[in-house]
Amino acid sequence: MMTNPKMQALGEKRSVIREIFEYAKVRKAEIGEQNVFDFSIGNPSVPAPDCVNEAICRIVKETPSVLLHGYTSAQGDASVRKTIADYINARFNTRLTGDNLYMTCGAAASLTISIHALANPGEEFITFAPYFTEYKVFVEGAGCTLNALPSDEKLLPDFSALEKAITAKTRGVIINSPNNPSGVVYGEQTIQKLVEILNRKQAELGTDIYLIADEPYRELVYDCEIKVPFVMNYYANSLVCYSYSKSLSLPGERIGYIAVNPDMVGAKSVYAAVCGAGRSLGYVCAPALLQRVVAACVDKTADVSVYKQNRDTFYQALTAYGYDVVKPDGAFYLFVKALEEDAYAFCERAKKYELLLVPGDDFGTKGYVRIAYCVAPETISRALPAFEKLAKEYQAKV
Amino acid sequence: MMTNPKMQALGEKRSVIREIFEYAKVRKAEIGEQNVFDFSIGNPSVPAPDCVNEAICRIVKETPSVLLHGYTSAQGDASVRKTIADYINARFNTRLTGDNLYMTCGAAASLTISIHALANPGEEFITFAPYFTEYKVFVEGAGCTLNALPSDEKLLPDFSALEKAITAKTRGVIINSPNNPSGVVYGEQTIQKLVEILNRKQAELGTDIYLIADEPYRELVYDCEIKVPFVMNYYANSLVCYSYSKSLSLPGERIGYIAVNPDMVGAKSVYAAVCGAGRSLGYVCAPALLQRVVAACVDKTADVSVYKQNRDTFYQALTAYGYDVVKPDGAFYLFVKALEEDAYAFCERAKKYELLLVPGDDFGTKGYVRIAYCVAPETISRALPAFEKLAKEYQAKV
């Protein structure tokens, strides 16, 4: 045995999404970029807002090199953390200080660090399917198990399943709203019901059950009546794992944070464990220049109106063609029922029309596919006839 | 138990170096920055070469935002990896391709990813004291143990100890040359002897023993006759963990790579395990802009002549005052014998003269202190009288 076989398997398999992403590259080279309809990856299609590149160039010019590119504190530059804490407080009426924030290399780092900080091997995290595939990888990397519970037909948590699933081994619940892959947003009632169960179970079991809110899509919500509740205002034992990847269209730059709710009992210990986990996993500090950039752009977002337009076009067209789609309130994904039971077979058939979709099985929900609509609007208009033909092929079969 | 107690302890203790770094901040506020002689942290004191900030601004202007700030492949942008592979090949006469390189968030990430990729819980890594303190944290984070072997009086590996220490559980040997904290460089003879033992033990035990070369200080060597051998040219089962933190004065930006020797048996499996470990630890990709920046500056280094000047001044003065110093060939550290047996007590005494030094105990070698001389030359000239007084205080005692 030359390697850790689990790690080798993870590296060899890659995620299904990455696999399709690589197939797309090859296929585009074969038949031309415009003829491949790649809806596989959640790479933002709108540029970063101007303030980002302006801030990069300004900060580079204004800041002495040794200070700018030097180590920050492991938890992040103090003034950056203060700026972000102040912004969150103003927006959500919270009482965070910079010392409740830990800057990270993006949402994946926020999650792995939080999980390693809180969990002991053998413990369990709960999430609701469909869920972001890498949760399983991150949780298992900490020696824990992920219990993915079903959702109801609106793709909201099945609370009776949650009641039954929580045991003394349950260390946390991971939620992701707006959701990848479904685009569903958990409204206030959902959060209240969830929190009611968690509080009750904590009291019953005498344990701490942490609520980890994975929120890279927080700013990507398309109707003004849709609110994404800020979990800290509902539940003391909560951590928010944020990333600027989607809100500022910076996924490659790896920048985000963990916010530890100051209202939780033992908040300082949990924060210390976050610092320790970051250290153990090799995260020395989040990229220094980008820390300053996100602080400079703390109240800005990329122009997400394109995503709304894409959602509306796509949702209306697919529904008209006979597809069964849960209308997404946020993120940039459609979660669509496959037209046959086996989503893999459906995706293979879609490939013949050069439509690259991701089977829902990998998100823990069989019989669905994910469509990432963070693409140019023209890609959607050119792809729609292919979706129509695909639907007709199935309708002809019946 | 609210957290993982190991992680909490790691976060609460912080590293001794960080602890002193924080003390220095407080002390500077009390008595003025110029009156505190902080030799605790290895934060480069020379600016990044001009090409770095030029490249940042140029790349930001030239590259469309979605491409620039988007995800790269998990292993790093293909053209960046090719550029670096070509550079290494030209310099060291190796045969790397981009597919042997995995871009990382700096040396700490390179190490943790390599360790998690190769090791199974319960296995062992060997290193030689004095060693960079975080090795223990990274190795234990993978469920393994670090066996730190003694060095000889020149602070080179004790090979008879190595012969005895290698067992069937030995998964790898971590070396760090130029060394933090000693500045010692392992010359060709040292590498040859090391490799001879590793090859022999591999044959005897029928195992793979990987040589992990942690090389953030490769470019920081001060005399033209000093060569740092490139381990891939000596040993098939080798990985190079590189970082641009010191060579380009970019420690806060977190950028480096892992190079997997293509000559090793199973190089593809090891590379896959590296990709899997990166994924498991939450490293989605190395910061995208910085990947392009280091490729643009691949053959540049910061002006390290200041470090050489600092080393010479410091070494000559301390030797003249009666300190016992191993002359460092590289890095930016002096490893000095404490003037009493207990290095902690010595550091406390030095603090009275506002000299902030790091006890060698934390690097696995008792009775020494580390002095980081990556500071302004004036800091050294102002600090020297304090070192002289400190030595005299001890001489008066005898």
Image: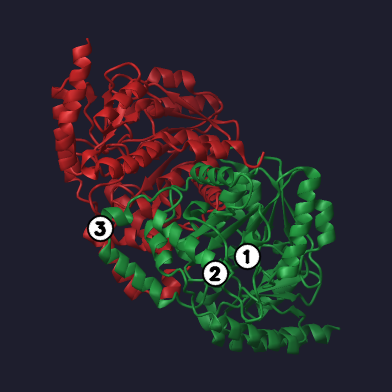
Chain colours: A red, B green
Query: In the image, is A153 to the left or to the right of B147?
Result: left
Spot occupied by residue A104 in the image (x, y as percentages of width and height) = 44, 52
Q: Residue at x 61, y 61 (%)?
A: B214
The kind of residue tagged 1 is Phe
* Residue at the (66%, 47%) spot, across then down: B140
Look at label 3 and name its amino acid. Pro
Quarter of the image for residue A56 reads: bottom left
- Which chain letter goes with mark 1? B
Disc 1: which residue = B230
Report, in whole angstroms, how far the alpha carbon at label 2 lies from the one at label 1.
10 Å
Q: Residue at x 61, y 73 (%)?
A: B331
Q: Are callouts 1 and 3 both on one chain?
A: yes
Residue at the far top: name it. A398
Mark 1: few, some, or many residues within 10 Å (few <14, many ≥20)? many
Disc nearer the start of the sequence (1/3): 3
Identify residue for label 3.
B64
Q: Nearer the viewer, residue B12 or B47?
A: B47
Check the residue under mark 2 and report the chain it is in. B
Q: Is residue B351 left or right of residue B35?
A: right
Instruction: From the viewer's side, name the closer residue of B106 and A290.
Output: B106
- Tag 2 near tag 1, CB within 8 Å: yes
Chain ID of residue with mark 3 = B
Q: Position of residue B191 (x, y in %)?
A: 72, 64
Does label 2 lie on the same chain as label 3?
Answer: yes
User: Which residue corresponds to mark 2?
Assistant: B91
Position of residue A360 in the picture relative to residue A327 (left or right): right
Image quarter for residue A311?
top left
- For the N terminus of chain B, which image quadrant? top right
Question: Which numbered tag is attached to residue B55?
Answer: none
Nearest the eye: A50 or B39: A50
Quadrant location of the C terminus of chain B in the rendered image:
bottom right
Q: Tell me the distance, in whole angstroms, between the alpha carbons under discs 3 and 2.
A: 32 Å
